[in-house]
């Protein structure tokens, strides 16, 4: 079996969209913005990305109701391609675990 695991921390930067599928499964979609300093080939570099996230099912549903723009999270999940309405593929993180990071406020 091939590995497909991603851990990404960041801030919710777009308002979460919540929907329920025709089969009754709750879904929450949002965008996570990540910024960090990394070392690559012995040099410091700034890493930045915006990653679409999908959270499906009852396991994390209650937690997704607390998410707002500015929420800081660590997400563990797998990545998959989704085809947008424009026909272009985009990489999406499917969350299996979410940890809220206390901002200290």
Image: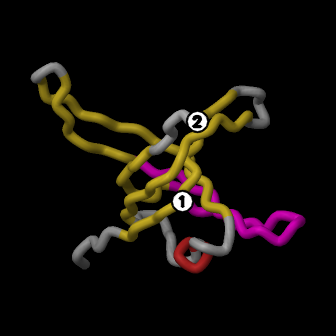
Magenta span contains residue 22: yes
Residue 56 sits in which quadrant? Answer: bottom right
Residue 102 placement (x, y as % from top left)? 29, 73
| Label whose residue precedes the other's in the sequence (1 or 2) | 2
Q: Nearer the viewer, residue 10 or 4?
A: 4
| Crowding at mark 2 (Cα within 10 Å: few <14, some 14-19, many 20+) | few
Residue 100 placement (x, y as % from top left)? 38, 70
Left or right side of 69 for 74 = left
Using the image, tell me which numbered label, if any, was put on residue 91.
2
Left or right side of 27 for 100 = left
Magenta span contains residue 62: no
Residue 11 placement (x, y as % from top left)? 39, 57
Q: Give the CA distance from mark 1 to mark 2.
A: 16 Å
Placement of 45 over or under 5, stated as above or below: above
Residue situated furthest right in the rendering: 22
Residue 37 sits in which quadrant? Answer: top left
Q: Residue at x 62, y 33 (%)?
A: 90
Nearer the observer: mark 1 or 2; the answer is 1
User: Do labels 1 and 2 touch, CB within 8 Å?
Assistant: no
Q: Which residue is mark 1?
A: 96
Residue situated furthest front in the rendering: 1
């Amino acid at each position: 079996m091939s590995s497909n695991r991603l851990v990404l921390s960041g801030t919710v930067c777009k308002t979460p969209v919540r929907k329920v599928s025709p089969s009754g499964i709750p879904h929450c979609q949002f965008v996570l913005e990540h910024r960090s300093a990394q070392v690559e080939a012995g040099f410091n570099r700034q890493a930045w990305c915006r990653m679409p996230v999908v959270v499906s099912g009852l396991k994390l549903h209650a937690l997704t109701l607390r998410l707002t723009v500015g929420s800081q999270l660590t997400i563990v999940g797998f990545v998959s391609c989704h085809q947008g309405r424009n026909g272009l593929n985009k990489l999406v993180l499917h969350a299996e675990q979410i940890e809220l990071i206390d901002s200290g406020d």
